[in-house]
Image (spheres, rainbow, N blue to C red):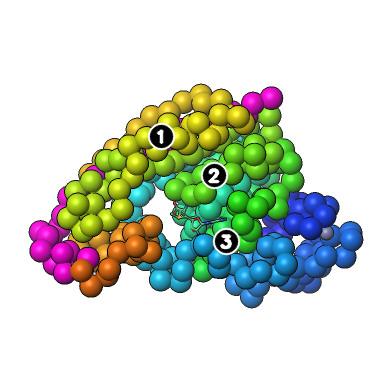
């Protein structure tokens, strides 16, 4: 619920705290933000619509369908294990930047224990309203907020003891600002072997071989790497699963769907595809 996370949010204009009254968030300077019927709030300045470079309705629907089949469940479990291994602060929250449908954040919250009757809340940040509608319902303790991760996160400095970033944009300075000094950042990126069987057959976008290094390099002014490992497993996908996988990813913007589906029809079913990601854990530099 948005109520659970309001105390962690700040006004995108003046950085003051926000209070919820009726269905409006308001800062002390009088900037107001309406809570959408679907339960998320738009904190994009200038009343910009939460769409931008974010995932479209079709991409989000495809992501939801694919995740519902459990193909990324091992990844969500791995992220949740990282999450529950660290210190849990009573007064902090978990922030997921580019949270999408809230799938990974929900898994993390489900695993974090309540203490003194209080369970941690999660802030799902995304620029896509289609994603946020889902994220708002993904777990009872998620509050979903529209923002542009590149321009700034509408979250109080140092309020997160855990920040998640799964296949999503990384603004190092902002990730560091919202993380408390003892907190941890968990970043998941695809490796060059991710979906390797599909990439050449369907003409999908390649993952850069140096992705892992580039991510670490970009974060290095703000974070120290404390752990990094590869998670790799096979997924047995139906043609429907492959369609969803293509439609939810970056290739959805770049490929010619007709040609892609014609090539898909040639593949055996089910088709074995490798999931290969790097899961990295960072601590903030002081
Ligand atoms: C590949 S999806 C990953 C979603 C989710 N983390 C998951 O793994 O299921 C990337 C997400 O980042 C969001 N996104 C893209 N650009 C963004 C931006 N500038 N600010 C915030 N979110 C953004 C997209 O809308 C999308 O939901
Ligand atoms: Zn304000």
Residue denoted by label 3: 127
Question: How far across and down, in percent of the image, does residue 109 sit?
Answer: 55, 47
The stretch drawn in magenta includes residue 139? no
Q: Residue at x 79, y 58 (%)?
A: 13
Return the disc, 2 or 3, that comes first in the chain's sequence: 3
Q: Inspect this view and state whether residue 276 appears.
A: no
Return the disc, 1 or 3, that comes first in the chain's sequence: 3
Dot 1 crowding, Cα within 10 Å, few <14, some 14–19, many 20+ = some
Indicate if the residue with disc 2 has its beta carbon within 8 Å of ligand 1: no
Q: State the extent of the magenta-drawn residues as a range.
A: 260-286
Residue denoted by label 2: 170
Dot 2 crowding, Cα within 10 Å, few <14, some 14–19, many 20+ = some
Dot 3 crowding, Cα within 10 Å, few <14, some 14–19, many 20+ = many
* Distance between the alpha carbons at the discs numbered 2 and 3: 13 Å
Return the disc, 2 or 1, that comes first in the chain's sequence: 2
Quadrant where the C terminus lies?
Answer: top right
Question: How far across and down, in percent of the image, does residue 216 sit?
Answer: 49, 31
Indicate if the residue with disc 3 has its beta carbon within 8 Å of ligand 1: yes
């Amino acid at each position: 619920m948005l109520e659970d996370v309001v105390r962690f949010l700040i006004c995108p204009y003046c950085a003051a705290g926000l209070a919820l009254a009726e269905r409006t968030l308001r800062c002390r300077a009088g900037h107001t933000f309406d809570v959408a019927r679907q339960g998320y709030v738009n904190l994009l300045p200038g009343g910009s619509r939460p769409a931008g470079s974010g995932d479209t309705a079709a991409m989000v629907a495809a992501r939801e369908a694919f995740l519902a089949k459990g193909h990324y469940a091992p990844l969500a479990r791995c992220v949740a294990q990282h999450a529950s291994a660290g210190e849990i602060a009573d007064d902090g929250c978990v922030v997921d930047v580019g949270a999408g449908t809230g799938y990974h954040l929900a898994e993390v919250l489900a695993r974090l224990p309540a203490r003194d009757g209080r369970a941690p809340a999660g802030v799902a940040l995304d620029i896509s309203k289609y994603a946020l509608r889902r994220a708002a319902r993904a777990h009872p303790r998620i509050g979903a907020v529209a923002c542009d991760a590149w321009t700034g996160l509408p979250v109080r400095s140092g309020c997160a003891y855990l920040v998640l970033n799964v296949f999503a944009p990384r603004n190092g300075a902002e990730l560091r600002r919202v993380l408390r000094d003892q907190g941890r950042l968990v970043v998941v990126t695809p490796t060059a072997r991710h979906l390797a069987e599909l990439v050449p057959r369907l003409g999908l976008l390649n993952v850069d071989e140096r992705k892992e290094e580039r991510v670490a390099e970009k974060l290095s002014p703000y974070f120290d790497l404390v752990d990094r490992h590869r998670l790799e497993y096979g997924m047995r996908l139906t043609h429907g699963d492959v369609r969803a996988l293509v439609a939810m990813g970056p290739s959805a913007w770049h490929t010619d769907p007709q040609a892609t589906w014609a090539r898909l029809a040639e593949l055996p079913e089910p088709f074995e595809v490798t999931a290969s990601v790097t899961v990295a854990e960072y601590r903030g530099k002081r």
